[in-house]
Amino acid sequence: MRAGLGALPGAQRMQIATPYLMFLGDVPDRLAAKTAYGIVDWRPEWCVGQLRLPGCQADLGIPDLTLDEAVAKGCKTMVIGVANAGGVLPEHWVSEVVAALDAGLDVASGLHARLGAVPAIAEAAERNGRQLHDVRHTDETFATGKGTKRPGLRLLTVGTDCSVGKKYTVLALEKGMRARGLDADFRATGQTGVFISGRGAAIDAVVADFISGAVEWIAPAADPRHWDLIEGQGSLYHPSFAGVSLGLLHGAQADAFVVCHEPTRTTMRGVGHKLPTIQEVIDLTVQLGRLTNPDIRPVGIAVNTQALGEAEARKLLDDLAAEHGLPATDPVRFGVEGLVDRIVTEFPG
């Protein structure tokens, strides 16, 4: 049996109770609630309803519930599914969080602001015996990465840029690999992923010296045929996030990787640097990844083709597959069968 995350010291402190009530506050648009949308997309069975304040311009397409209705339907945690500028908790949301705690719910947040730093929230959690989960932060103490070979198989998504579909790719792979009878688990390294999996660590909040060690903790020694599918972050070529990406690569000790790409971009998000080519990302990932796994190899290309028509998307994918000798797909639009086929071929047994 695998030595799973839940078996590790401290792992249960990371566990978020399901099902969820999704709190959207009064966000001005869908993008501001992207965390909530990601959770609903991949774990709809955990999302019982949503709580919105007057003026909210986002709608997850699930029932609107009061706190009492949510508790009656079995909700365990209210998730603040919002990503706003600065990661702040608006003052007028504090009373809603306190009310949720008083109603008997735990509260989880992906904001940079810590829930427990607000006195009224901390007091409500204490008097009700409820848990506060700040998924961008953890009380877990990580060791530095060691790079020692550990059993189990690991796949990491890497990107030509940030926000190109790395999380969605590994989630689609989890579903596709399990459907083929493979033992595979998604491993979260960002706040939305932690909500989707119920556990994990937001790597961008880990002190740099301990990034690779945190990934070793997230994806520990396992059964030799078990796959940990590790959510990538940033890009090795992105001047803002390359440090996080490299720590992830070394800690993952990846046997396989999938390159994720958005074809309409010419520069990387938030900076003026030119987007690297897929081949450049493959070459650099292999070069740097060999430090902790000399046998690292690419197994496919995942392309976000949302901005392309179907015929144009299919032609691009066919061209990329021919150019790189790897299966290429849009995991959300066209599935991951080709990627799973390649994984089975490369890692038989």
Image (cartoon, rainbow, N blue to C red):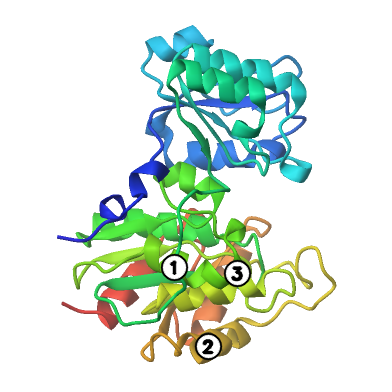
| Residue occupied by mark 1 | 143
Q: Secondary structure at mark 2?
A: helix
Q: Residue at x 74, y 33 (%)?
A: 29
Q: Nearer the viewer, mark 3 or mark 2?
A: 3
Tell me where residue 147 sits by quadrant. bottom left
Is residue 229 placed above or below 252 in the rendered structure? above
| Residue 54, position as x, y percentages in the image | 73, 14
Q: Is residue 222 left or right of residue 266?
A: left
Is residue 339 placed above or below 45 in the rendered structure? below
| Residue 262, position as x, y percentages in the image | 65, 66
Looking at the image, the residue that sits furthest to the right is 272
Q: Is residue 337 left or right of residue 82?
A: left
**What amino acid type should be assigned to the residue bearing mark 2?**
Leu
Q: Give the camera-side residue of 282 and 200.
A: 200
Q: Which mark is residue 288?
A: 2
Q: Residue at x 47, y 7 (%)?
A: 68
**What amino acid type should be assigned to the residue bearing mark 1?**
Ala
**What amino acid type should be assigned to the residue bearing mark 3?**
Ala
> Which quadrant, please, contains the N terminus?
bottom left
Tell me where residue 295 sits by quadrant. bottom left
| Residue 298, position as x, y percentages in the image | 44, 82
